[in-house]
Image (spheres, rainbow, N blue to C red):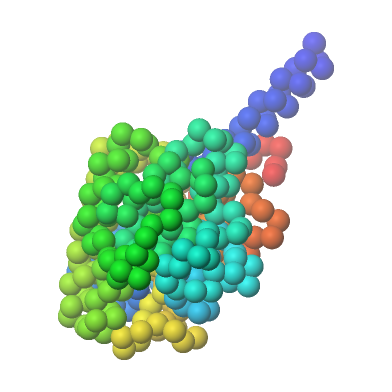
Amino acid sequence: MRPLFVLTLAVLTSTLSAAPRAEHVFIVSIDGGKPKVIHEAEMPVLKKLAAEGAVTWTANTILPPKTLPSHTSMLTGLGPDKHQVLWNDYMPIRGVVKVPTVFSLVKQGDAAAVTAAFVGKVKFRHLWQKDSLDVFDFGGPQDIAPVAGADEIEKRVVPCQTVAKGASSWIPEKKPRLCFIHFPDADAAGHKSGWGSPEQKEAFKVCDQALGQIVRAIEKAGLTDSSIVLVTADHGGTGKNHKDDTPDDRNIPWIAWGKGVKKGHSITTAVNTFDTAATALWLLNVPLPADFDGKPVTEAFESPPATEKTGGS
């Protein structure tokens, strides 16, 4: 009987240690989210998530601090030297990123896992690998085939309220394992009127209202107790641009809120945007590739119960 007991215990231990820390992960990126301006803007939802969860206001993005390279690092766990997405416009001729994304890695582990991206800029199509997403929404669900008129469509920005509306109606029905949501408004206002301008602060306020829609959709879906929401940004900004190796351009917020997150915790370890990918995969118990630059921000989370730690990792 002893060998059977030992075998049963080993199987049970393996099952417990393999349990994901969260069933659902939502990554929300507020494009151009400079922490200094966020603090000055009317953003009660974001600030509530930060107060209730774990936060650092001094996380960093990559160089160059540009939207597409930065988001590629955020969603691949790699620096630009590895992912090689160094351009910042929609250029169909370049195809899609050649390294795995968090979406493709989740699908490799479980082909039935539901993944999605709701975005405000067409350039995110460069991150849409075949069979990696159940839906790619840019003002509505898109087809994976390349689109014509790249120069014109590049100028189109889907407002955060539209992005949030699409995501909010879809989340309760599909209950995704991993969902990425991108709000472009503050970046657009920064380029037009300047970072920290009244117009940009108003855009941040609208983004916060859109964030509230997402939180309510998660609640409506009955996923609050099994989900983690990661709120971050791709870059900050100075004047009307973001291109330099300065805190104003590179500092970004990084907030974790939800199941197992330390309450009211200030993160002290250094956080980079590629750590977002590593954290999402770690939470979902998806193995990290050996060449990952990103590391899970484990400090933000409570230790799992002793039964889940049995056997180590």
Q: Nearer the viewer, residue 85 or 76?
A: 85
Residue at image x 29%, y 81%?
191
In front here: 224 or 119?
119
Q: Position of residue 121 (x, y in %)?
A: 34, 63
Residue in front for this viewpoint, 87 or 249:
87
Residue 74 vs 166, above or below: the answer is below
Residue at the extreme top: 1
Q: Position of residue 285 (x, y in %)?
A: 58, 43
Residue that protrudes farthest toward the right in the picture: 3
Identify which residue is drawn at 30% across, 36% down.
172
| 188 up-or-down from 254: above or below | below
102 left or right of 289 in image: left
The answer, for residue 284, to whether it is visible in the render is: no
Q: For the N terminus, which image quadrant?
A: top right
| Residue beneath the point at 32% across and 79% down | 36
Quadrant of residue 53 within the rendered picture: bottom left
Question: Residue 248's x, y, as percent?
Answer: 40, 84
- Judged left or right of residue 43, residue 148 is right
Q: Position of residue 161 (x, y in %)?
A: 21, 57
Q: Picture quarter containing residue 83?
A: bottom right
Quadrant containing the C terminus is top right
Q: Nearer the viewer, residue 312 or 293?
A: 293
Total marks shown come to 0
The residue under the point 43% across, 41% down is 134
Please indicate, yes or no, whether residue 203 appears anywhere in the rendered image: yes
